[in-house]
Amino acid sequence: MRTSQEYRERLFSMKRNVYMDGELVGRDDPRIAPAINVISLTYDLAHDPQYEGVMTATSHLSGQRINRFCHIHQSVEDLLDKQKMTRLYCQKTGGCIQRCMGIDAMNALSVITYDTDKAMGTEYHQRFLRYLAYFQENDICANCAQTDVKGDRRKRPHEQVDPDLYLRVVEKREDGIIVRGAKAHNTVAPYCDEIIVTPTRFLTEEEGDWAVSFAIPADTDGVYLSCRPAMARPRKKLHAPITTYGDVESFTIFDDVFVPWERVFLCGEREFGGRLALMFALFHRHSYTGCKPATSDVMMGMAALVAEYNGIEEVQHARHKLVDLIAVAELVYAAGVAAAVTAQQSPAGTYIPDPVYCNVGRRHAGLNIYHEYEIVADLAGGLPATLPMEGDFYHEKLGPLLDKYMMRNPRISAADQHRCFRALSDAICSGLAGLLQIAGLHGGGSPVMENIATLGFYDLETRKNIAKHLAGIPLD
Amino acid sequence: MRTSQEYRERLFSMKRNVYMDGELVGRDDPRIAPAINVISLTYDLAHDPQYEGVMTATSHLSGQRINRFCHIHQSVEDLLDKQKMTRLYCQKTGGCIQRCMGIDAMNALSVITYDTDKAMGTEYHQRFLRYLAYFQENDICANCAQTDVKGDRRKRPHEQVDPDLYLRVVEKREDGIIVRGAKAHNTVAPYCDEIIVTPTRFLTEEEGDWAVSFAIPADTDGVYLSCRPAMARPRKKLHAPITTYGDVESFTIFDDVFVPWERVFLCGEREFGGRLALMFALFHRHSYTGCKPATSDVMMGMAALVAEYNGIEEVQHARHKLVDLIAVAELVYAAGVAAAVTAQQSPAGTYIPDPVYCNVGRRHAGLNIYHEYEIVADLAGGLPATLPMEGDFYHEKLGPLLDKYMMRNPRISAADQHRCFRALSDAICSGLAGLLQIAGLHGGGSPVMENIATLGFYDLETRKNIAKHLAGIPLD
Amino acid sequence: MRTSQEYRERLFSMKRNVYMDGELVGRDDPRIAPAINVISLTYDLAHDPQYEGVMTATSHLSGQRINRFCHIHQSVEDLLDKQKMTRLYCQKTGGCIQRCMGIDAMNALSVITYDTDKAMGTEYHQRFLRYLAYFQENDICANCAQTDVKGDRRKRPHEQVDPDLYLRVVEKREDGIIVRGAKAHNTVAPYCDEIIVTPTRFLTEEEGDWAVSFAIPADTDGVYLSCRPAMARPRKKLHAPITTYGDVESFTIFDDVFVPWERVFLCGEREFGGRLALMFALFHRHSYTGCKPATSDVMMGMAALVAEYNGIEEVQHARHKLVDLIAVAELVYAAGVAAAVTAQQSPAGTYIPDPVYCNVGRRHAGLNIYHEYEIVADLAGGLPATLPMEGDFYHEKLGPLLDKYMMRNPRISAADQHRCFRALSDAICSGLAGLLQIAGLHGGGSPVMENIATLGFYDLETRKNIAKHLAGIPLD
Amino acid sequence: MRTSQEYRERLFSMKRNVYMDGELVGRDDPRIAPAINVISLTYDLAHDPQYEGVMTATSHLSGQRINRFCHIHQSVEDLLDKQKMTRLYCQKTGGCIQRCMGIDAMNALSVITYDTDKAMGTEYHQRFLRYLAYFQENDICANCAQTDVKGDRRKRPHEQVDPDLYLRVVEKREDGIIVRGAKAHNTVAPYCDEIIVTPTRFLTEEEGDWAVSFAIPADTDGVYLSCRPAMARPRKKLHAPITTYGDVESFTIFDDVFVPWERVFLCGEREFGGRLALMFALFHRHSYTGCKPATSDVMMGMAALVAEYNGIEEVQHARHKLVDLIAVAELVYAAGVAAAVTAQQSPAGTYIPDPVYCNVGRRHAGLNIYHEYEIVADLAGGLPATLPMEGDFYHEKLGPLLDKYMMRNPRISAADQHRCFRALSDAICSGLAGLLQIAGLHGGGSPVMENIATLGFYDLETRKNIAKHLAGIPLD
């Protein structure tokens, strides 16, 4: 297992292909640093003995102890542990741990490469296993680039005015393929080792060229990472962990990129393109049953803290609102537990969480994210939006006055009240907060997508038969 | 295990103490029959080999195969099986299976009698085990009479103008005790073998007399069952299972009732009175994670069926509303699964489901019950409320006209459309529907109660510490 | 203006064409009596001087004082008065006043007959005015039969397997027309004088035969009223106004009914068929901004009363829930006020309320109806569902015991507590309650219909231009 | 009426007492400029003939045409016009017009100074009228500083450890008073002419010192404005109106400030302190029935625009969500209309909008604000959160690639799609968006406050009597 130092060193030695606001920048640009801090944690805690078995796992390939973010789930317990790990990490960073993308893509590939081979006589699975060995050995941090830019939403890939609006194979060579297209919303891409590409939707018979999956180093020629950083407002003096974490999103362009065959895991088997899209989404939604409860943990911690500081923690409506947050957290987590407990083992050996529970869990999180912000804002009052800027608190004349007038619960120091409200301002009234709201709604698929997936998997017919029986209508 | 025939025979041989609308009636009164049909099913299916191990269990006392409704949970699997059994039964009856009260009370007593003995040096647990042996051997159907009538809600039991407004011990004799009071909302009491009484809330030091628990035959002298039946509108010709099931609620008065010591399981240990109240509520809320999903199953079956008959099953808003129902069902069920998977074994050996998951699960069901009816009504349209009466469909002139004008989806016969809407009328537009709405909200404790319980068990301090850490506030 | 006695006398002298449960019954059948009581109130209070100018109006035709239910709106004040009248009546009956159908149909006809004549050179408006004179002079109570049975919802009228599934003209004669079809959900039809028929939806060019509107006596040959009564459970001794009111719904079949030309107001002008459907719906939705607040008044009165009796009226969550009810009532009412204040005068002189406000108002009521029942149930607790039957309270032994154990707030007598909970049981746990829920959702058009209507009338383009302006996008 | 040029000139000539991040800055600091642009609009459009009578009014004092923001409401029409004006202005700035504070404070003072004089024999009203003349003549832009910092929320003003936590009179002199304290959430204070101070809550008999109201120039000695600016992310090339508007919030400290008697409008009449607090809140909540619909207009415009660009404007769920936004806007606006139509004239002559409608309207806006953001985010997808930074679109290599891959609806240019999503990013994913969410929840009083106010004014007793009548319970 790598150390975070090794992760950073490798990162900083990569070729430059990260762009920010019109400039080509290095991966050591300070605007990326808060995001790198997030990923670094996943290397640091894996070495911490207290997290042994949660943050780490035993590779079924090598028998070695590996970072769990590189592991293929071999049991119900693995799924439960991944969920637990995800929640723990996200509690510590106050938001998305980001590295789940890699594990979710790798697990999806483990299942679908096998199934494709069985059906089509291809040899993707062995290729994947070699890549997995490399992945585990080098403790790779990977992005999964799934969401195509999609152009006109009413049209299918092959119907677009510009066929590149879904990433596709434009040439097949003896040594590999050339791909062209763009993927949106790629968290982690500017500070990961590798980018794993998967299709984004079901594909029709005409759409074999769009059925492509592969993994390449993030600094491969022809890959352009157009980036947008998000972080809390930087502090000058009142330092706090919440301001040290952030994320960077990439709009990733593949401008005729070459991929060697040993890194291609699907190429033209259009039926399996859709299944891979769905399988990644499924594992990723199971990850959300771990991370979203952590987001709720953070929100409810903030809410309970400010309720205490404001002196309203015993007021009934404040208490009921805390339960609203608890209920969101624990129902989503429970859905993940139920998905793990009822998991199915795929022919490849990988454990696949139950799709209905994953989808209703992720959906519940998505439907409640804005309401969670509303609750925290409700209990905090208006100060997160109107808190004077940090410097005023250190001004000779103003500082003592602000300290005097910030006082609430007299047992809490002015400094702690200041820290509380500044953190709240970061958490619910900043560009980062806006990003987390939108990610909480859409990340991993928005509720509308989960509606479709839920109906696709649910046994509604049995329920109709229950109704027919009760009504005295003969069953078909 | 008894047969339903044996259950009925014993029932019909009991002393008369059931009242309806001013009359003393026998337990064979036709208004009770639909409710008896519900309980009978729990005897019938226990003999059906396909439900072996779900509807039945192996007694840890006798090693015999027993009805699971008489079993003390010995493992996580037992809890999962009880949840599964409950859902299955309720799917079949279209509503509450009712007999869960007995198993929940017995499991709570198994835990608390043991704990009381350890703390107080009493001998309730052995007494309970003897009763349990009798209970299992005779395949007893029991009511749990918990909810006191409570008088003025602002006052504690000992502060009431009339101390009997919470059931209490009014005399202790050598051979037993005399109790006085009344219990409300007693489903199953008029057609069960035994009534188990538990306290309803935490008790203060002055309130030892109210800390009493016992079990007695339902026809014991001094017990008055003032009853209210609920069932679907009876049919003349268009028979359907939905009209064969119902329930009867009892307002049960204990007018100086004698209870022999061997049937007394708590008497004066006021601290354990509150714990028993809570423990029964906990097991009962876990039961709700099985039964409420079945209620949702029935509702979604009805909704999907009428959407098909109305020809709108592919319309987006209809599909999204079905997912609303699915999500309620499966999130509540998932909460029960998570509660079972994280169960704790009590010193008495009984497995206790996790209280946070039980409470957020039951709460979610309660918060959604009216919304579920709204969805079914939405997809059904107004006809369940305005459907002509049954006889008109069999009238020489009107019948054919109604058949002609009832037609919707032309693939579905007029008769089936009629059956569908008449069942919907029973399900969402009848006194029984009103009862099920209220039971869905309040049964086993309303959401406000679950808020209190959730906060009582939840580790909010850890979440505040997460917030403090992120904000840079020193932990205490 | 007629007296209620005159209304009844005329009613009871009509020909028999009302069916219930397979029997042809007289309009004096006791199951219809509670509904007749509702309509009678609209005759009685019109003679009460304190309601002068609200319950009555001055006819713009005759200059006579008439019942406002016969009036064509001549001003903004008329619309405000109709809204006020509707709320007052519904507060008194605890539910729908029912007679609004007639006034809404007549106002719609006043507008559309005029517009049709202008566009098509027909002479419907004079014919309508003659009918209006008769209507006002005889203080007619009318049903509006709008909703066709509609068959397969995916198909238009002319595409149905059976063309009669939307009511249509099957023959035109010199002296009149023959119509065939059926109309559903006809409140008031079995106890009104006249039935006014209007189309139910927009019609295509092929659908001239379905563009028909007329008015006929409710006992015309060929009209079959297949009825379903709804009322609170009858009382033996504990009489209360809530049990004296009810409604009867009719499934009305027109089996080749002859309509003389002087009663035909549209016949083949298919474009105006759709406009008439919409215009009736608009006036009717404005009526809902008067009646639904009254329903909320009743619900909040019940909720506040039971909160007081239960001693929780000062508890925060109870208070917040009362505000939920107040807010529903007053936002819906405010929408009606705004619709009146911004009304437009049609070429015929009739004032037409603003469609956007009418629709968002009615929609808000529909979206909240089940939630209102949930709140009342929440504050009432389970007793409305489990209250012992009336007779037990008068039983020699049980009566005093029930009185003893019903006691809550000691300032309130047992009898009043009994009355309160029995009324609640009628209001939220009865077949009538189920009907009112469904009527509250679907009556006058369900929220999905109001979505369509709102979008049809709303100036969304202006809002898009606001957004374009802010974004710096050139306006088209 | 002043021009915006005159407003700015006066502003820039004021003494320096504005602080930002530890620095004393001039009012011409560029971080304040976007907020000044907002206020400038209220001077510019008042001179635009097309807004004559809406943006302007006729002074009842002088008979002169004045800016409506300086007017005392003399009729129902004035209230309707103020509401209309507010909506128009806020549509143009895309958010809060801010200057309503002044008009609302002045109208409240017009009522309460009169009432105080009548009850207490004081002479505040004449003093107020002289100030009003000055106010109208100089077209003053005023802040209303109401919300005290409030310290421990469980304690009253006189119970606080530090009595200054509510602003109070610390000395009365012959020529005026000395006040000390701090007011939070003061929008407009750093770029207005005058600050009007009012109490924040009801006051007890011990709290006369806290019953103080006055108006002073914003740069009075001893006034410290600790400020926090909020604006959209600045643009380099892709200029758009949305980025030119913003606000600055002040935490305003009154460090022993002298106020001459002619500017004191309440001093010690503690009963009227509470009434003034409530009266300002009432007028301000009526303002919200104008501004919040404009916020919804902007949101729905953005939502409809992005739905069109994404090609989903005809999808049912997108359409239904637009209606959700329309319904929020128009129900809130309707509440303001109803409040105006049912306004009462105070003894001073000022028209006071109905408090129930104002409160349920403002409450509805507050309860829906986060949901509105959720809807826009839902229809926009994730791109507002992950949109590449502006500069990349102008980079030689990246720019054309981003243009290629941004394409959606092929009828819309890449540049317009870019503008649309950048505006969305400002609108829902920025610090400014966070501020608008919190302001939408808490500004003018959060829903919990409106619950209290609604119950305080609502005639619940009449509704209880309706329920009693229906239940057969004798009225008291």
Image (tube, coloured by chain):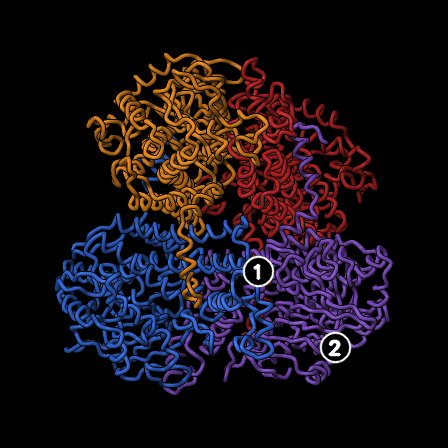
Chain colours: A red, B purple, C blue, D orange
Spatial separation of the CA atoms under disc 1 and disc 2: 33 Å
Residue labelled with disc 2: B47
A27 to C258, vertically: above or below:
above
**A149 or B85: nearer the eye?**
B85
Residue C159: x, y in percent? Answer: 34, 68
Residue D414 picture quarter = top left
Quarter of the N terminus of chain B within the rendering: bottom right
At 47% from the left and 78% from the top, the residue drawn is: C236
Specify the subunit that label 2 lies on.
Answer: B
Q: x, y (%) of residue B5?
A: 71, 83
Which residue carries the number 1 mark? Answer: B441
Residue C97 as seen in the image, left or right of residue A305:
left
Foreground residue, D451 or A79?
Answer: D451
Helix, strand or loop under label 1: helix
Image coordinates of residue B137 in percent, x first then y, are 81, 75
x, y (%) of residue C321? 50, 52
Same chain assignment for discs 1 and 2: yes
